[in-house]
Amino acid sequence: MSDKCTSPKGHNYTAKVIAEAPGLAEFMEEIAAMFKNSGAVNYLEMQFGLKDDELGELVITIQRKDGKTPHELRLESEAAHASLTEKVERLEKALDKRLKQEYMDEDHRLGGTYRTYEQFKQDALLESEKDDPTATDPAD
C-alpha cells in the first residue's frame, strides 16, 4: 500500500493521516483556501471557539512549510528591536556629550548667562526639527 493518497481535489496526503482522521483532507483543503484568501504570506492563526476544560481556548495555526514560525519571527523582531534600541542609546549618549560641550562653549561665550543645560538641549532639538519635518517631539 502506498503511503500517499490523493484527495478529491487532487492534493496529496499521507494515507496514515487520512486513515486516522476521515475528512481531514477536505478540512485541509478548506484551510488552504482560507490561507490563500486571507492574504497571509507565511502563517495564519485561526480561532474557531475551540475550548478544552483543562487546556482553555485552542487555536489552529497553519504555516507554509518553507516559512518561519510565529515564534521564529518574534525572536527575529525582538533581536532587531534590541539592536536598534542599543544603537539609539549609544547615539543619545554621543549626542548628549556633544551638546554638553556645545553648551559649555556657548555658555562661556555668553559670559555664563545661558539658562540651563536642559533648556539648551531642548533648544538644540527644536532647532534640529526645523531641518527635519519628520522629527518627533523631543519630550517623547
Image (cartoon, helix red, strand yellow):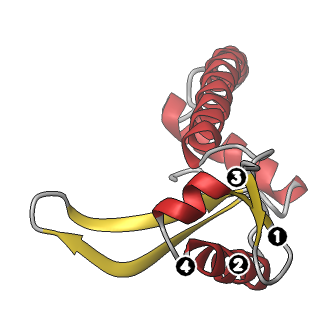
- Report how far apart the C-alphas of labels 4 and 1 lie in the structure: 13 Å
Q: Is residue 76 above or below residue 89?
A: below
Provide the secondary structure element on which disc 2 rests.
helix
Residue bearing the label numbered 3? 126
Q: Are marks 4 and 1 in contact (CB under 8 Å)?
A: no
Residue at 80%, 47% (x, y): give it.
128
Residues packed near mark 4 inside 10 Å, few (<14), some (14 to 19) or many (20 plus): few
Provide the secondary structure element on which disc 4 rests.
loop
Residues packed near mark 3 inside 10 Å, few (<14), some (14 to 19) or many (20 plus): some
Provide the secondary structure element on which disc 3 rests.
helix
Residues packed near mark 2 inside 10 Å, few (<14), some (14 to 19) or many (20 plus): some
Amino acid under label 1? His
Residue bearing the label numbered 2? 29
Of callouts 3 and 2, which one flags the residue occurring earlier in the amino acid sequence?
A: 2
Q: Position of residue 6 (x, y in %)?
A: 79, 69
Residue bearing the label numbered 1? 11
Q: Nearer the viewer, mark 1 or mark 3?
A: 1
Q: Nearer the viewer, mark 3 or mark 4?
A: 4
Amino acid under label 3? Leu
Q: Is residue 84 above or below residue 68?
A: above
Q: Nearer the viewer, residue 70 or 109?
A: 70
Of callouts 3 and 4, which one flags the residue occurring earlier in the amino acid sequence?
A: 4
Q: Are marks 1 and 2 in contact (CB under 8 Å)?
A: yes
Residue at 79%, 78% (x, y): give it.
36
- Report how far apart the C-alphas of labels 1 and 3 lie in the structure: 62 Å
- Residue 23's mark? 4
Provide the secondary structure element on which disc 1 rests.
loop
Q: Is residue 76 left or right of residue 6?
A: left
Q: Position of residue 34 (x, y in %)?
A: 68, 82
Residue at 10%, 58% (x, y): give it.
54
